[in-house]
Amino acid sequence: MKTDLSAEYFSRARTVIPGGVNSPVRACKSVGCDPLFVQKASGATVTDVDGNEFIDFVGSWGPMILGHAHPAVVEAVRETALDGTSFGAPTPLEVELAELVCDSVPSLEKVRFVNSGTEATMSAIRLARGFTGRNVVVKFDGCYHGHADSFLVKAGSGVITLGIPGSPGVPEDIVKNTLSIPYNDVDTLEKTLRDDSLDIACVIVEPVAGNMGVIVPEMHFLKTLRELTREMGIILIFDEVITGFRLALGGAQERFGIMPDLTCLGKIIGGGLPVGAYGGRKDIMDTVAPDGPVYQAGTLSGNPLAMAAGLALVKELRKPGFYDALEEKSDFFAAELARIGASANIPTVLNRIGSMMTCFFSEDPVVDFVSAMKADTDRYGRHFRQMLEGGIWLAPSQFEAAFVSAAHDRSQLEKALNMTESSFKKLAD
Ligand code: HOZ
């Protein structure tokens, strides 16, 4: 595979951008290679600057549920841009998208748009603290809620990928207000939430973990979490930045029938443009400025291009049969992947729900941070490089999800499966 131009861009990038990238995992350090620089993408394929074409299972880390450059999204952005790209004033587009999002996500009565998932989660915990008058945030080991100070405690995503235990620059005073406990562990959950001395404002959780690889929660865990938080007057926040509009139109909460008090969204609702959102119960959301005292603001919040892209995309998702078709395609892909994994001479564990999945190079079931960390990351690195050589673009980390999109066709999925089979064989040699 020719990579001369990518290498050249990487070398230039490293002199002016830390690590040569604008988000750490992209540097591909944990999979032992340098990043490829992307020229363009269309449908389920990505083409790099050297002209190599790949079948894409990263989907920009989640947003591309329709595939890249979907005509409806591109047209909406193009048309909107002709009338101006930012006004710092309300627009009809944000009202329309807010209405559609509240109508789609069952627990949302009101929603505020921001610019990223990180902004959504940090705003949601501020709101939970303001509403309850308490200070402590409970999260789960290996869950990732963006890079705000309060969340960089036993975090997933790039933090575990790069083996960073906690980040310098995050004051101890902030860390002491974040409690991280094991995912899927009902006993610890119960003990923690029932401890009145802890001053817990909220619990934030990925209702399906996607940032230590995909981990589907035990229903008993999620149900207990909902019941206990309600009983103790603690705000339950679902971080649905990945699962929102991915696992169903109404996200994980619709799929599982469990309603949080607040929900954080991002990725898909921006159609590939920078967007985040937080929303939920009206009484809580009415505490946000200007109706209430909890301050949160943003010059580019509700940006017209992002709103237009999100609207165009969500309208596609609301067409009858969209999620059934995606589920069926993902069923086929996951079943074949599991079959290939089961007959390989290396241990693999496939965790999957809907169109998101992770194949762990692991002996044992992966149910939490500790079991995820047992995965063989060197083997994943080799697998990643072999797949890339074979034209398949996977996340450059064992601890991320692979996403199937509406744009993947049968032949692309079959090619990816064939490549996986031959990669597993080489790994076993
Ligand atoms: N939330 C993304 C990972 N699951 C972030 C991707 C990145 O770190 O660039």
Image: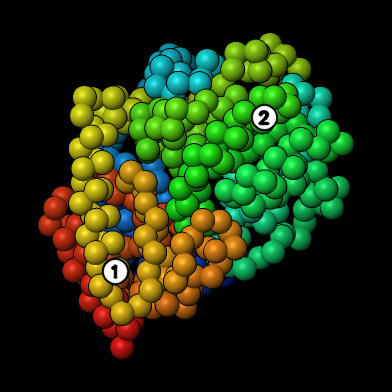
Q: Position of residue 345 (x, y in %)?
A: 31, 79
At 35% from the left and 78% from the top, the residue drawn is: 346
At 46% from the left and 48% from the top, the residue drawn is: 216
407 to 342, vertically: above or below = above
Q: Which residue is mark 2?
A: 229
Under mark 2, the amino acid is: Thr
What label sits on residue 208 in the rendered view?
A: none
Q: Residue furthest left?
A: 411
Regarding residue 265, the answer to whether it shows in the image is: yes
At 18% from the left and 69% from the top, the residue drawn is: 418
Q: Which structural element holds mark 2?
A: helix
Q: Which structural element holds mark 1?
A: helix
Foreground residue among 25 and 48: 25
Q: Is residue 2 left or right of residue 273?
A: left
Foreground residue among 198 and 23: 198
Q: Position of residue 183 (x, y in %)?
A: 59, 50
Foreground residue among 113 and 184: 184
- Mark 1 or mark 2, which has the lower sequence index? 2
271 to 151, vertically: above or below = above
What label sits on residue 342 in the rendered view?
A: 1
State how far apart marks 1 and 2 are (Cα).
39 Å
- Dot 2 crowding, Cα within 10 Å, few <14, some 14–19, many 20+: many
At 66% from the left and 31% from the top, the residue drawn is: 228
Q: Is residue 387 left or right of residue 91?
A: left
Q: Position of residue 235 (x, y in %)?
A: 67, 27
360 to 351, vertically: above or below = below
